[in-house]
Image (cartoon, coloured by chain):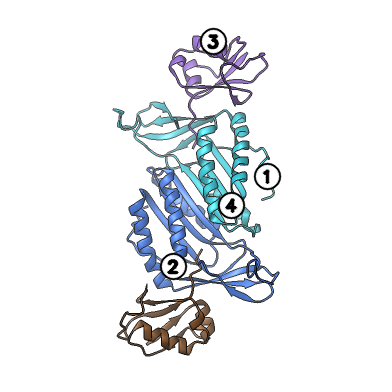
Chain colours: A brown, B purple, C cyan, D blue
Amino acid sequence: MEVKLFGMIAEKAGAETIAVAAGTVRELRQAAEARIDGLAAMSYAIAVDRRIADDALKLDGNEEVALLPPFAGG
Amino acid sequence: MEVKLFGMIAEKAGAETIAVAAGTVRELRQAAEARIDGLAAMSYAIAVDRRIADDALKLDGNEEVALLPPFAGG
Amino acid sequence: MSTDKPHKKRDIFIDGPIDPAFVAESIAKHATRTDIGGHEIFLGQVRADMAGGTGGGSSARTTAIDYTAYRDMANEQMTPIREEAFARWPITCLHVYHSQGVIKAGELCFFVFASAAHRQAAREAVAYVTDEVKKRLPIFGKEIIADGGHQWKSNT
Amino acid sequence: MSTDKPHKKRDIFIDGPIDPAFVAESIAKHATRTDIGGHEIFLGQVRADMAGGTGGGSSARTTAIDYTAYRDMANEQMTPIREEAFARWPITCLHVYHSQGVIKAGELCFFVFASAAHRQAAREAVAYVTDEVKKRLPIFGKEIIADGGHQWKSNT
């Protein structure tokens, strides 16, 4: 599935999206951390269908998924 | 001395100022209440030289004196 | 702004309603102050309330407020309020304006504007100054009622 | 305003800085609402802070913030914040705008605007919404530093 990247994470990855295979948010996190240097050491959240998701959430591959570095609005 | 009148007090007096003789704020109050119908029943303050004054304050007749109905700014 | 010293005596009164464009100009003047992180603004607008409040028998509404003030005293009373605000909060600027004359329902009559590095200081200063101006400044308001009458506004 | 229903989904993002004239237009639109007694506004302005905070060795200042956002999610996340504000305070209107793109120091990047019959409700709603937007909306800020570098802003 395609994963949207933002801010510092997009910068580290050198891309706006990456493609990974994952059946849960936890697998997604592990796959992303294997792909993006330094991500494992960062504070970030994972959004599934535009909501912050827990590691246990199952994915069927049709969700809109994104990796979100710390928020900085305002 | 000349006494400035504002708002509801000026309306009741039908004038922007009245002239009274008074050696203290208390005497000023009594003189004004004798001159302006309904003033005795109103809530109002007396300003001497642009500050709210107590009844005991002495006046030499050179002060700037005003009768102030309730404030309504904002 | 360099004109914002707490001790400077200024005239807070504006003849007629406060124009939103004047608010915009006031905001724009702060673009040179790159130590400011937030602006907080309060604007008072004249409300078309039922005259006489809930107990009144009148069904007529306020159409305007005619503001008068003991202008010299009001401007002098702003000085301690301004000093108190600068002493209590790390604000960079504070501006206060109040209308005099007839202000119709829907028009703006009161403008309080504070700027600071951080939003909390600006927010609290505006709340304080707004409340103190209403309490301590000799400003008087005659509410003009749709049926042709009037009554006197009181903040107490 | 009739367009201010809490459930209405809107785009809060503005390309580039927020123009003070836009703030004035937003204020002016409320002149027809004669049940409004007060407007409270918060404006966020980009600060030229020392890069890296007090611990950093750099003496270079932030010259701008380049804002990006997960726009669809941010707009969706505004809905509950808006509903919470309308549920907790008797406000008549609530408007929120945030910049995206490069906003220079001294320019405005964030605009929160609430109106109510009484000032307390508008004041508290603006404080709440300002804080919640900073916490809950996926907006990202790259601080551009005078020496040519950059660093990522974080509200946490």
Query: Which residue in the protein does label 3 denote?
Result: B31
Query: Which residue in the protein does label 2 denote?
Result: D137
Q: Residues within 10 Å of mark 4 (few under 14, many from 20)?
A: many
User: What type is the residue that disc 2 sits on?
Assistant: Leu
Q: Are marks 1 and 2 on the same chain?
A: no
Left or right position of D20 against D135: right
Left or right position of B47 against A55: right
Could you tell me which secondary element the residue under label 4 belongs to? strand
User: What type is the residue that disc 4 sits on?
Assistant: Ser
Q: Residues within 10 Å of mark 3 (few under 14, many from 20)?
A: some
- A16 and C19: which is toward the camera: A16
x and y percentages locating residue D84 in the rendered image: 35, 57
Q: Are marks 4 and 2 on the same chain?
A: no
- D36 and C9: which is toward the camera: C9
Could you tell me which secondary element the residue under label 3 belongs to? helix
Numbered badge on residue C115: 4
Residue shown at 38%/27% (left/top)? Answer: C148
Numbered badge on residue D139: none
- The residues bearing labels 1 and 2 have C-alpha atoms spaced at a distance of 37 Å
Query: Which residue in the protein does label 1 denote?
Result: C5
User: What type is the residue that disc 1 sits on?
Assistant: Lys
Q: Is residue D107 above or below residue A14?
A: above
x and y percentages locating residue C32 in the rendered image: 66, 58
